[in-house]
Amino acid sequence: MKLLVTGGAGFIGSNFILYWMKEHPQDVIVNFDKLTYAGNLENLKEVEKNPKYSFVQGDICDPVSVDKAMKEVDVVVHFAAETHVDRSITGPAVFVMTNVVGTQVLLDAAVKNAVKRFHHVSTDEVFGSLELTDTSKFSERTNYSPRSPYSASKAGSDHLVRSYFTTYGLPITITNCSNNFGPYMFPEKLIALAITNVLEDKKIPIYGDGLYVRDWLYVEDHARAIDAVLQKGKVGETYLVGGMTDLIPNVEIAKKILKILGKDESNIEFVKDRPGHDRKYDVDWSKIKRELGWEPEHGFDEYLEKTVEWYKTHEQWWKRVKSGEYEDYYKKQYES
Ligand code: NAD
Ligand code: TYD
């Protein structure tokens, strides 16, 4: 089988490729990635010489290179996106271009080249925000209610993907998953930012009151979920994917990281809140468990410790990532 993985040089895409090549060594993988600030081929060092793996630098908004890359592809796994909510607040245009227009360009090429499956990787953020007091969770039946330019652009892409199923019969599946953590997580997102800041003797910036809640999913569990959907999922269906956390507020995550690294809580700094900050995400993953037998296997505390350990032993990786453009971004985001 030949897979075209878009955004394979990013955090989740690279973990997915490493996972897939271990679990399905007979398959051929083409990684199609523009290499924006978030794309990093170092993540894929251990497979770059494998003859079953190849890399194409390209933009999903460019129909010519997308069509070329789609030739003889059986399965598309679409990760490529602009993904950081804070960046979507300061510069939404590129989010619409990549996440909406880029997805549409890929869908056209998938129809033209008759791919057997187009799997779209999306987010629980399309469902909006829960209150801390809500006992309900997001499910496949929840209405879309995105509240940031990032989540609105992902919502647009989800609707387009479904429309290509009903209009053109493209065999699609969608997963909407919660916040991922693990190796190669870009240090603009909370857990990687917090760990690397502490390792650099900097404080952990916590937005607002710190009582915001995310449903954290270990990245390998996410790769396993996509695998289950590709093998056993029903065409046209959406599956929600979530983690093993029990409603842990951001400030508690910061405390856990400080404890693992032997530092005290004075290293937390409460900073200006994010505009329109979604209070809580919580995912009901019972459909994918019931229908495909998937459930998360990596407990939060144990894998948070392992993730901290990974950053301790991969200092060169994150130090390189946290230089150049990142320094300007950090200044604008946190020091203004
Ligand atoms: P990331 O920002 O780490 O990586 C995105 C990748 O896409 C990068 O390699 C980048 O170079 C590439 N890319 C960006 N624009 C491109 C373009 N125009 N053409 C080709 N490649 C392009 O993202 P991530 O955190 O790995 O997220 C991957 C997917 O999972 C996204 O679709 C995101 O919406 C979704 N998702 C992420 C999370 C999370 O917690 N990170 C949670 C739910 C869903
Ligand atoms: P983030 O990792 O940006 O993911 P998302 O906004 O897509 O859920 O943020 C996770 C949570 O952490 C969110 O509630 C915002 C908060 N946060 C901070 O408190 N400080 C930070 O420096 C960052 C980046 C996020």
Image: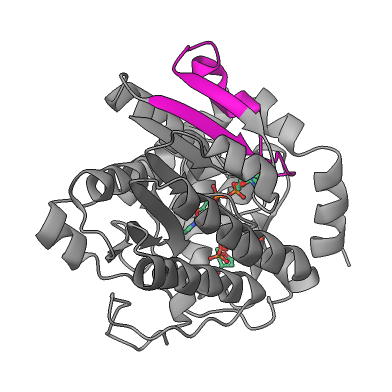
- Counting from the top left corner in percent of width and height, residue 297 is at 23, 45
Residue 157, visible in the rendered structure: yes
Q: Is residue 80 above or below residue 266?
A: above
* First to last magenta residue range: 28-55
In the image, residue 165 above or below residue 7? below
Q: Position of residue 30 (x, y in %)?
A: 51, 30
Q: Residue at x 33, y 29 (%)?
A: 1
- Classify residue 66 as left or right of residue 124: right
Q: Residue at x 74, y 44 (%)?
A: 37
| Residue 213 seen in the figure | no
Whether residue 228 appears in magenta in the rendering, the answer is no
Q: Quadrant of residue 11?
A: top right
Which residue occupies the foreground of this view, 2 or 5? 2
Q: In this rendering, would 197 be left or right of 312?
A: right
Residue 53 image offset from top left, x and y in percent: 49, 21
- Residue drawn 28% across the image and 56% down it: 244
Who's the residue at 58% across and 51% down the image?
264
